[in-house]
Image (cartoon, grey):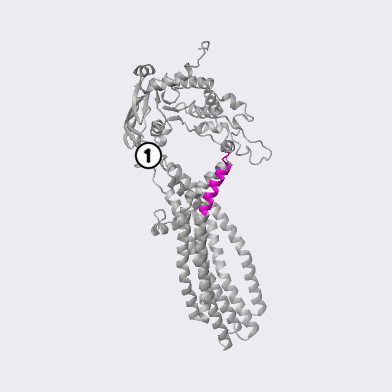
Amino acid sequence: MTAAQPRPRMLLAGFAPAWALAFRAAPGHVALDLVLTVAAGALPVTAAWFTKLVLDRVTAPGAGTDLPLPHLAAGLALVGAVAAALPQITQYVREESRRRTALLAQDRLYTAVNTFPGLSRFEDARFLDRLRLAEQAGDGTPAMVVTSTFGLVQSLATGLGFFGSLFLLSPPMALLVVVAAVPALLAELALSRRRAAMMWLIGPVERRRLFYSALLSDPRAAKEVRLFGLGDFLRGRMLAQLRAAHATERETDRREAAVQSGLGLLGAGVAGAGLVWAVLAAGRGALTAGDIAMFVAAVAGMQAALTGLIHHLAGIHQHLLLFGHYLRVARAAPDLPVADPPARLPALRRGIELRDVWFRYSDEHEWVLRGVNLTIPHGESVGLVGTNGAGKSTLIKLLCRLYDPTRGAVLWDGVDLRHVDPAALRRRVGVVFQDYMSYDLTARENIGMGDLDALHDPSRIEDAARRAGIDDVLSALPRGYDTLLSRMFLPEPDDDGAQTGVVLSGGQWQRLALARAFLRHERDLLILDEPSSGLDAEAEARVHASIAAHRAGRTSLLVSHRLGALRDADRLVVLDGGEITETGTHAGLLERRGVYARLFALQARGYADELPATAPG
């Protein structure tokens, strides 16, 4: 058993939660399914007995029951009619139960996922593999556990009925059929473990296959795929992953085919031996025609019931193995410790301090930040400068408490962020990330994602768009702010004639992301990570003027590779190799002739060397 697979104790512990989830979602349907299952289990035995009585009444009128033949025939016909209708009714009840259970299971799963306050799990490939299996398990496993349990009950009811009937005719044969089922049970349980392990094994392969297939169909990737001729390359990668998954599945299927073929031959041998005995006994006059019919039906019915019993036991076993992934995600502890009770987060009055902060993503990774000491005073703006990989984005993640420092502390007016509710902290922060999101939603919803309370307040949405310099663009769209900013979906799913949405340019998306941050203008801390990297020079100038007006008197952290955008910050901080190497004003850092001065000179030279003498100021 691999470390990724649930242990037997966990396997048994998952049975009750799966049942509880299904019963909570659809109690009436579960109860009705039980009634229908018991009825379905009794029908084959009832039909066999009616058949025996009819045959005995016809061939030996004085033997067996005194019920008139028409009554027996009517009873047999009624059993047949119920048997014909019952599967369809049961199927509907089970499908409705599955839908309701899947809805509740997915709700609980993503409620749990949303409680993870940090980013570490979403940057962990093993967790993402487990989450994919948890999604699959939540979609149908609890309902399947209930269905398989009821199938177990049905097979047990049918099997006991036929066992009693066969025991009356031949006790040794009844016991032989039961004993012959033991190897089948052990083999099926082993196969179910193997199939569950296979699903975990091919999880990473399946995720990579989905990644490549998504690139082949994603409109955002279509330009480069066609321009660079990547289609065949990505298709080859996708098919290679699919072949790898199929090879693993094929090996499991071959093993199952071999084992189940052997089990089938064993069952056929037992049934054949019993049939020879019954024919010989009938020849001696020990069995009637009805007895032979009952014997054949009982052997076949008992074997089918035992096969069903084993199948449902193996099914429950496999479903619970998969459900273990669901439970491990749904019951996972927060990836960041949350104090209970959390400390009160005061209104920012003094500032934010990083005190001897060290950070790395795991013990196997190099240090990203090394002994960082930094203060962001209340009401002032700090510009953070550094080359790629210097640790700027990581520092922002710590300020938002998406990670905790490995060593040291981040203090908000003296309060360690580890002691604060992360949700309370994030309500006090406005951020534009360098890798901002572009949602396949309307323009209004894209801005409203910054503060859901403003989603239905047009004045706040439009004011934020004006501050970001995107209002004119959004107002001119076909449906204004209600225009869908995507061509992946139709604006109205039921309108076949609807036009597809509009796709913004990179700079327009960046201004829209900036509008999301402006929507949170009353927050204590504003963080802008490369807020104008995709803008043209004129748009950048307007945006920075708006940013400067917006952050006047506010506590803010600005990050940009364009040093001219940071020169008017109250203080500049240079981060190099995870350490703060310089700090001061723009003029002061130029005088020091250090890293900042070198970077600024390189950028300025690129413009100054080409600047015409008549260029406007």
Quadrant housing the N terminus: bottom left
Task: Estimate the x, y position of residue 231 in percent, counting from the top left.
Answer: 58, 42
Query: In front here: 564 or 427?
Result: 564
Q: In which quadrant of the rendered view does residue 223 lie?
A: top right
Q: Is residue 247 visible?
A: yes
Highlighted range, magenta: 229-245
Residue 64 vs 242, above or below: the answer is: below
Q: Residue furthest top?
A: 614
Say whether residue 494 is left or right of residue 117: right
Dot 1 crowding, Cα within 10 Å, few <14, some 14–19, many 20+: some
Residue that sits furthest to the right in the current view: 497
Residue nearer the viewer, 580 or 447: 580
Is 230 magenta? The answer is yes
Question: Which residue position holds label 1?
Answer: 361
Question: In this figure, what is the number of numbered marks?
Answer: 1
Residue 416 visible to the viewer: no
575 within the magenta span: no
